[in-house]
Amino acid sequence: MNEALDNKLAKLADLQKAQKRQIHPIPPPEKCDSCSKNLSDEKYYIDGALKNSTAWANMCPKCFFENGEDIGWGSGQLYMQEKKGSWLLVAGFPSKDKKLKDGSICNFCGEEYPKEDLLEVKGGEFACRSCMDNADEIMGAWLDQQKTEESK
């Protein structure tokens, strides 16, 4: 953890908006895509575009400041670790500041949907069908990988 880098990122965070939105990545990344550092050892991570590239990566703060484009919708999202392995979007929110209504925003992608189109996933958090399908696909691939590793 680098305190100077964390302080720079903390200035970008909007904790009040983050607490209202409650947007979490599913599943949360475990390692920095650039240096393979364990992200659970970090206060922040960035899911963002790489400089001079169309590629995106999950980056620790050091790799973001070396290789990342920016924080903002369309360029990068800043996540803060609330507790070990649990991350909250704190900057880089969707561009529209949507009027919040209970259960009208997917807590994973931040998009607004009619309440009946959202599924309650845990403790008052809601997910759209697209995020649920994506989670199923990601978890299925992860389980397949685990089975392959176990059979070696």
Image (tube, rainbow, N blue to C red):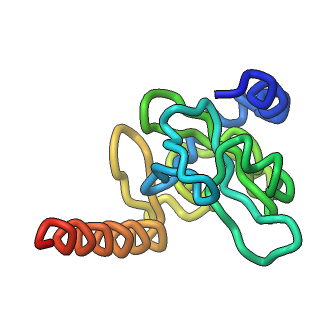
Could you tell me which residue is drawn at 83 percent across and 54 percent down? Answer: 72
Residue lying at the far left in this picture: please name it.
151
The answer to whether residue 93 of the structure is visible from this angle is: yes
Q: Is residue 49 above or below residue 29?
A: below
Q: Is residue 15 left or right of residue 95?
A: left
Rendered image quadrant of residue 15: top right
Percent from the top left, x then y, of residue 27? 42, 56
- Residue sitting nearer the eye, 102 or 13: 13
Q: Please identify the quarter of the rendering in which residue 101 is found.
A: top right
Residue 60, image x, y percentages: 65, 45
Towards the viewer: 3 or 140: 3
| x then y, percent, for residue 7 | 80, 24
Q: Is residue 91 above or below residue 148?
A: above
Residue 10 relative to residue 127: left or right: right
Q: Nearer the viewer, residue 117 or 51?
A: 51
Q: Residue at x 11, y 72 (%)?
A: 151
**Residue 20 seen in the figure:** no
Q: Quadrant of the C terminus?
A: bottom left
Measuring 72% from the left and 74% from the top, which residue is drawn there? 55
